[in-house]
Amino acid sequence: MMASTAPSWPGVRPVKTCTECKQSKLRCDSKDRFPNPCSRCQARNLTCTVDPSFRRTPARKRLEAMSRELRELRDQRIAEARAGSTTSPDPDSTRSQDSAGNASHPSVSILLDDFELMGLESFELNGVIIDNHTVLEVFKYFLTYFHPHLPILGPISLKTIYNSHPFLFWTIIVIVALRLPVVSDETLFARLHEPYMQVLRDEALRAPMPLSKIQALLFLCMWPLPVPHQRDDPSWLYCGIAINAALYMNLHRSSPRSGITPSLYSVGVVSGSARERTNTWLGCFYVSTSLSMHLGVPPMINTPSDLATIRAILSEHTISREFSLQIRVLLILAGFTNVLAHNSNDGVVDSSVTQLLDGELDTLKITFPDGWTRMTDFLVMVVKIHVYTLVITRSRSGMGSREILLKLGLATALRIIHLANARFHERSEKASTFTTAQRERTLPKDYYRGLAFATIFLLRYFSLTNTANAEEQLAANHVIMAHTIFKTLVTRPRDEYDRAANLFEVLCKQAPVSVDARKSDISDRMGVSIVLDAIDTARELRGYPVEMPTPDIAITTEALPAQTSISHPDIFASNSQLEESWPSDLAFANMFWGDSSWDVFTVPPEVPQFHPPGPHGSMPGI
């Protein structure tokens, strides 16, 4: 466990004033409010950081520095304007190459033009009615903000989705309505939630499962519906259903080059085009491998032949560059996870494997520089910190390799939070109808799983240690950044963002404990053990039990039949009509095992190979 006491923040932040308050010579309460920003920074929406090396700058020098920065920015914009379109955009400085901007051609996946030609003004799901304009608005949002993260559809028309794939149709509407405000129908999700859950319960286990239903389940795994606790999230179960249905449809044997659509009449489902089948199988691998990493379980698609098939598909199949690179990252993870999971906790082997994984991931960026976005970089960092944590948690204290991995883990966790914070404060170049928080809620859940994992890593190994140094201070500043992101995304009390922020707050109230003094009670969930351990620690700090109660099973005799005095004939009594087969079986066995032909197998014929039962039916020696 991480700790069992719950005093206030015990002063491991040696500097009491944040840089903003120090510059203004004002009292700061950052120490008392950690991991929340200080009151002044929160009211003014400023970045609250504590830096022991910060020195206040006089007002005149600040004005001179601001003037110099303005001149540099003006000169830079003039130079860019002169360069025109001859200069390729930097993937780290423009939104067009990031995930939300990859849907520049929405007609490639879903065609919306023919939908209005259906002549339908409204659509109904178990008594809930929505109009035509709402459906079009929702699918436009889906194409822009959601589908680029999992581009497995299309080309297909919205009219076909509604007529032939109703489960996929309503799944997309519910996912979008939960995360984005629909202008034409603000209560859409509240009205659709329960009727959709009834459809989901009916459809999830109905066989055979067509291709569109597999795609719908994969979307549900990426953007799950709200649950009261993380343990109630059924994404892993949905993922298993989708992958088994995909195997049943033979999607793992799809050939994107052949263009041949196999006939699946015998299995009772429409096969789909070769492109759809290939895209869906890639989606199965992407979703299952990412989920397995964040849940600490072995990947579902992990055999060498399966991974080789995925690589072959990437080499001959055309998909978006970002999605292709992210699949390659997860391919590296799946291969190394197999090695680490079957390794017998050998520190030398773990360190060597980790070093090889680092090299493979770094080489990937050099090999495929085009299309390398911050989202891909974010995924690489998350993969690295999961592997680092796996090796750290099962390494002995004092090992040199463990200390190296802790330093690497610190740098990686800081990079993850930095990328998330930069994205969160980025201003879109195009006018948007959504706020930053609304836009960021469209990201897949695994994105925030990675951000929460990095934050818990910092809390466990740096921010909550009994040492006060520059590393601890840097980690604490980044914990504030992550906490601010989660708090800003909260839409209702006790939603997933609110629970994550509350978890960080509770963990920050415990006393500092040496890293080596914390022994996790959960050791079989790979690197995710520190997250599960953090949840148990927070429950203990709140005064709740951490053990699941064993349900009491009532023992009653009411259902047992009463004894009766009616006599029953003994069916095992001697009966001349029943033939005893035991002696004949023994005779055959002795004849079979005592055959001299067994001499070729060095079996001595004089040793009885089968012993007949004793006088009372018992075997000799028993």
Image (cartoon, grey):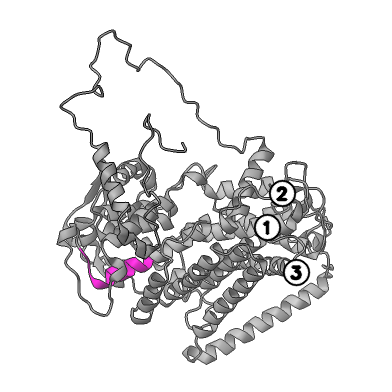
Whether residues under marks 3 and 2 lie with C-beta atoms below 8 angstroms apart, the answer is no
* Dominant secondary structure of the residues highlighted in magenta in the image: helix
**Residue 110 against residue 220 in the figure, above or below:** below
Report the residue marked by disc 3. 400
At which x and y percent is residue 109? 30, 69
The residue segment tinted magenta is: 271-283
| The image quarter in which residue 416 lies | bottom right
User: Total marks drawn?
Assistant: 3
Quote the CA–CA distance across marks 3 and 1.
27 Å
Q: Nearer the viewer, mark 3 or mark 1?
A: 3
Q: Residues within 10 Å of mark 3 (few under 14, many from 20)?
A: few
The answer to which of 162 and 538 lies nearer the viewer is 538
Residue 475 located left or right of residue 434: right
Q: Secondary structure at mark 1?
A: helix
Q: Residue at x 23, y 56 (%)?
A: 165
> What's under tag 1, amino acid-wise?
Val
At which x and y percent is residue 366? 54, 84
> What's under tag 3, amino acid-wise?
Gly
Q: Nearer the viewer, mark 3 or mark 2?
A: 3
Residue 24 located left or right of residue 538: right
Q: Residues within 10 Å of mark 1 (few under 14, many from 20)?
A: many
Is residue 280 a member of the stretch shown in magenta? yes
Res 222 label: none
Report the residue marked by disc 1. 479
Is residue 201 a member of the stretch shown in magenta? no
Give the mark nearest the N terminus, 3 or 1.
Answer: 3
The residue most toward the top is 565
Q: Secondary structure at mark 3?
A: helix
Whether residues under marks 1 and 2 lie with C-beta atoms below 8 angstroms apart, the answer is yes
Report the residue marked by disc 2. 508
